[in-house]
Structure formats: C-alpha cells, structure tokens
C-alpha cells in the first residue's frame, strides 16, 4: 500500500494548517453570524405573546391558565426568535 506522504513531503502538513488558519482569519467576518438590530416588538408571528425583559434577557412569554410547567426554548445565534 502506498504511503500518503513521503518523509520529504512532511512539510506540507504545517503549511496546509497555516494556510487554513490564514483563510479562517481572512474570512472570519463572513463566518460569524451578525444578528440584525430589529426591535423585539417587530415580530408579527409572536404578536399574541408577552415580551419580557429581565436583567437584559429578552424573551416572549405565552401565559397559560393553571400551567404547572415552564418550557424554555433557546433558538441559538442564527436568527431571531420570531424566525423560529
């Protein structure tokens, strides 16, 4: 079975690693999600929910009579809550 790299070609591994790191550094703005600055109140799909803002944590609350359980859903960093 042939070898993937010969000993004389081992220098390619750090070169590829450095090149990939350079690419990630160069493209980092495009690889990171930057959310828009749309206000929390502008979410037509969640207009029947109550908006809460406690200690900088914003969210939508759906009041249910006689509820015994709270379910918290985190939508992550790829959009807004009204997209979920």
Image (cartoon, helix red, strand yellow):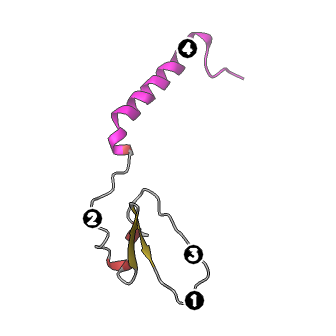
Distance, label 4 to label 2, CA atoms, is 52 Å
Distance, label 4 to label 3, CA atoms, is 59 Å
**Mark 4 or mark 2, whichever is nearer to me:** 2
Tag 4 residue: 9
**Mark 3 or mark 2, whichever is nearer to me:** 3
71 w.r.t. 6: above or below: below
Residue occupying image coordinates x 38% and y 78%: 46
Residue occupying image coordinates x 56% and y 73%: 71
Neighbor class of circle 2 (other Cα within 10 Å; few <14, some 14-19, many 20+) is: few
Distance, label 3 to label 2, CA atoms, is 27 Å
Which label's residue is closer to the chain start, 4 or 3? 4
Tag 1 residue: 66
Number of the label disc, if any, that sits on residue 70: 3
- Of residues 27 and 74, the one drawn nearer to the viewer in this rendering: 74
Image x and y of residue 64, in percent: 51, 86
Query: Magenta region: which residues?
Result: 1-30
16 w.r.t. 10: above or below: below
Image x and y of residue 11, in percent: 53, 14
- Secondary structure under tag 4 reads helix
Tag 2 residue: 38
């Amino acid at each position: 079975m042939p070898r993937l790299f010969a000993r004389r070609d081992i220098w390619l591994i750090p070169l590829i690693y450095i090149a990939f790191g350079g690419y990630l550094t160069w493209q980092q703005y495009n690889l990171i999600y930057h959310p828009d600055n749309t206000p929390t109140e502008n979410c037509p799909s969640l207009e029947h929910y109550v908006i809460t803002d406690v200690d900088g944590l914003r969210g939508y609350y759906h009041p249910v009579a006689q509820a015994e359980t709270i379910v918290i859903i985190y939508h992550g960093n790829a959009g807004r809550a009204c997209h979920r």
